[in-house]
Amino acid sequence: MVRRNNERRAALLDGAIEVLAAQGARGLTFRAVDTEAGVPPGTTSNYFANRDQLLTQAGGRVYERLQPDPATMEASLAGPPTREHFMTLMTEVVGRVSGFRSGYLALLELRLEATRNAELRAVLTDRVRADVEANVAHQAASGLPGDATAVKLLISAYNWLILEQLTLPGVFDEAERAALVRAAVERLIPADPTNPN
């Protein structure tokens, strides 16, 4: 019987994220999640039918936790439609995503696992595609400068920059990372929204 306590399910998924980040996909077992979440043995198996279900739902949970809060979303729409405001938003995004280190590392593990698991690959592909489309739509709705291609290029560049920061932090120091965030925006987003060139 699958349990329905949403708070417990979220706690178990958070435990799964931590296990994925610390031990990789091979370490993700129901017992490891029970231990990480501090629940009695057998709890995780009461909430998830199998390991694949745990993997796919853990991926969804990472994205839930990465969502900006309502105040951040409101600020992004309320600010002036300038490249400088865009820069502020991109700095917040990079900081928010890299600040959830275990979530980002868990997503990397899930992506690697998805190369061998078609169902997980489909779930992650749909989720990432939806995330990209939402970012492009938000960009258009905000009135900020830049087109869909610029948004997609920034997502790609920042994902790699965050990957370096979380896995090989000695590659770029903090000042250089900040400069790279700024340089990416300056090169891809026009200073004058009425003149994209």
Image: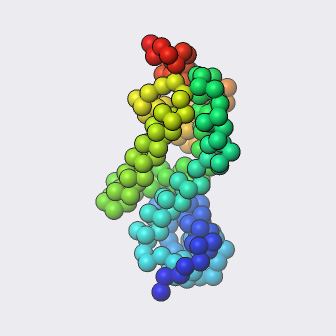
Q: How many discs appear?
A: 0
Q: Position of residue 165 (x, y in %)?
A: 59, 38
In the displayed image of the protein, which residue is found farthest to the bottom? Answer: 1
- In percent of width and height, residue 158 lies at 52, 34
Q: Residue at x 47, y 50 (%)?
A: 108
Q: Is residue 96 above or below residue 182?
A: below
Q: Can you see residue 62?
A: yes
On screen, 173 above or below 118? above
Q: Identify which residue, 2 or 27, lies in the foreground.
A: 2
Please tell me whether residue 55 is drawn above or below residue 88 in the rendered image: below
For residue 70, side relative to residue 163 (left or right):
right
The colour style of the image is rainbow
Residue 186 to residue 64: above or below: above
Which quadrant is the C terminus positioned in?
top left
Left/right placement of residue 18 relative to residue 115 reads right
Residue at screen point 55% across, 79% down: 4
Q: Is residue 155 visible?
A: no
- In this rendered view, identify the residue nearer to me: 156 or 195: 195
Q: Residue at x 62, y 74 (%)?
A: 8
> Left of 39 or right of it: where is 143?
left
Front residue (pair 127, 74): 74
Residue sitting nearer the eye, 136 or 37: 136
Q: Which quarter of the figure has residue 44?
A: bottom right
Q: Residue at x 54, y 28 (%)?
A: 144
